[in-house]
Image (cartoon, coloured by chain):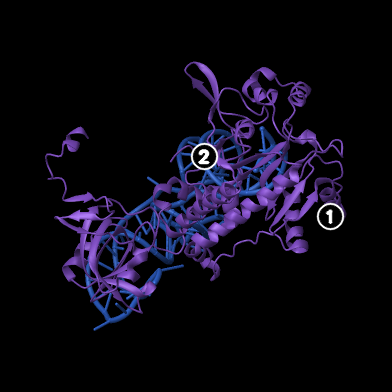
Amino acid sequence: MAAAKCGGTTSRASLVRAASGGFVVGGVIMERVWTTQLGAHIGERVRIAGWLHRLRQLSNLSFLVVRDGQGLAQVVVEDPALIARLAELHAETVLAIEGVVVAEPQAPGGVEIHQPTVEVLAAAVAPPPFDLFRPAINAQLPTFLDHAPVGLRHPRQRAIFRVAAASMAGFRAALTALQFVEIQTPKIVGAATEGGANVFRLDYFGQPAYLSQSPQLYKQIMVGVFERVFEVGPAFRAEPHDTPRHANEFVSLDVELGFIRDHFEVMAVLNRALAGMVAAIAEQCQPELALLGARRGEALVLPQVPAAIPTIHFADALEMISRATGEDLRGEPDLAPAHERWLGEWARREHHSDFLFVWGYPTAKRAFYTHPDPARPGYSRGFDLLFRGLELVSGGQRLHHYSDYLAVLAERGMNPASFGGYLEAFKHGMPPHGGFAIGLERWVARLVEVPNIRETTLFPRDLTRLTP
RNA sequence: GGGCUCGUGGUGUAGCGGCCUAACAUGGAGCCCUGUCAAGGCUCAGAUCGCGGGUUCGAAUCCCGUCGAGCCCGCCA
């Protein structure tokens, strides 16, 4: 690096990335054009670059389909020598192509590149384990995951992660507009935060440490600083789950806010956040939605986020399910997945909503910091949000009096000493507050209608998978 | 942690006691085809059927073990 900085030689600069984003080639700067922007360059000679997605050979000409980070472009090759050269390349070879952009109704997207010159930037040395040029990858999930570095290149797979990116962007935008401050809390923690869930243990210079299972305690502390905070980050759970909706590392969209009257204000913020997420996807991901819905022949339809998401009390939900199904659930401490699915269908049917708030879960089933419902002993101000029948969000109002925390920790047999920093915040005054956490992968999975969150996690970590 | 199911060429499947020296599709190799777009046609190569043991005249096919994977439940985002 130091030698290069001295700048004596320029000999390696036959192909260097220029500050402009283009390339310097033989001393001539030619901007590299995204495949999705070709329509704006008709009649011009341009340079594109990407991966050899597919070569279709016909007798007198061949079609070379190039994929870049955004889309696909068709290149028409008529020179027999060039076709012969291309035919020897494996799919996924990295190419740079210069040619003339031509409007052509027969071409996919209406434009294609003619009279190309092709430069191989990096050869693929083996064919891909499965076909990337087909409408969908034809491989079982474990096979796909084993080959994720290649499989994620498939236009449909990567569309899923553009939806995830837009979701995060919309989440950030909605909360920022509401005066929330984005924070980053530590993922290496000194105490097993919430007690219950299994945590991953680390060796931290000889002392025990853990991977954070949730930013919960830190985001509450930060309410004492900014009043309104949010965080987008990983959460780690050492639970030996093996289901399509669990992973041992996932992305949590966390929110916490102070000076609330009750949990309904928290639910209103969540309502706004979801609306922002859907709006961002609608704005940024139309091509992706079209691609993801293609198997049904129509673009994927985004859920409508109601101005006020329907709400039901936990006890009423049990009552209703009992009445409808004949199964007596009264007195149950929690909802089973089958009941959540039932409620999801009910919300769809009765309220035309993909979303349903269930609040008032029994205090005993919620975390220690959950605020009880003063009007209804045994029940809490904790809520879940069901999205299409799946638990997507957990949240609620939290305790905020120092004395309440000391009492509840003692009641649950938890050691106050391991909550030192947390309790200090309450010792020095915390407002009534609450918050929630959205599971990003679950959100995207339900949204794009894939059955397993492993498909909405880039490199999932589960019971048996630590690589790639 | 409990229950159920599955493991066949690179990939996805069929075959479920002898017709299997294992079939089909797709990918790969080769040839042909004036515009393809999951292109089309022909030819070739590619799996001792996860692994180990057993039953049987005979096992991909039945049994046991083992390893790997998937689903449901508990629990959760």
Which colour denotes chain A?
Answer: purple
Q: Is residue A107 visible?
A: yes
Tell me the crowding category of disc 1: few under 14, some 14 to 19, or many 20 or more residues within 10 angstroms, Cα based: few
User: Where residue A346 appears, x then y in whole percent?
Assistant: 77, 59
Give, as a three-letter code, the residue at label 2.
Answer: Arg
Identify the element where label 2 is drawn: loop
Identify the element where label 1 is drawn: helix
**For residue A106, side relative to residue B3 (left or right):** left
Pick out the residue farthest to the top: A206
Q: Hey, which quadrant is residue A84 in on the image?
A: bottom left
Using the numbered discs, state the Cα–Cα distance from disc 1 to disc 2 in whole angstroms: 37 Å
Q: Chain of mark 2?
A: A
Total tally of numbered discs in the picture:
2
User: Where residue B29 appears, x then y in whole percent?
Assistant: 25, 61
Comes first in the chain, label 1 or label 2? 1
Q: Is residue A390 visible?
A: no
* A17 up-or-down from A285: above or below: above
Residue A341 image label? none
* A106 up-or-down from A152: above or below: below
Q: Which chain is blue?
A: B
Residue A325 image label? 1
Residue beneath the point at 20% across and 33% down: A2
Near-viewer residue (A121 or A131): A121
Q: Which residue is mark 2?
A: A461
Give, as a three-letter code, the residue at label 1.
Answer: Thr
Q: Hey, which quadrant is residue A255 in on the image?
A: top right
* A321 up-or-down from A209: above or below: below
Instruction: Locate the N terminus of chain A and report the quarter of the image it occupies.
Output: top left
User: Where residue A416 appears, x then y in whole percent?
Assistant: 69, 19
Near-viewer residue (A384 or A318): A384
Asked if badges 1 and 2 are on one and the same chain, I answer yes
Instruction: Locate the C terminus of chain A and report the quarter of the image it occupies.
Output: top left
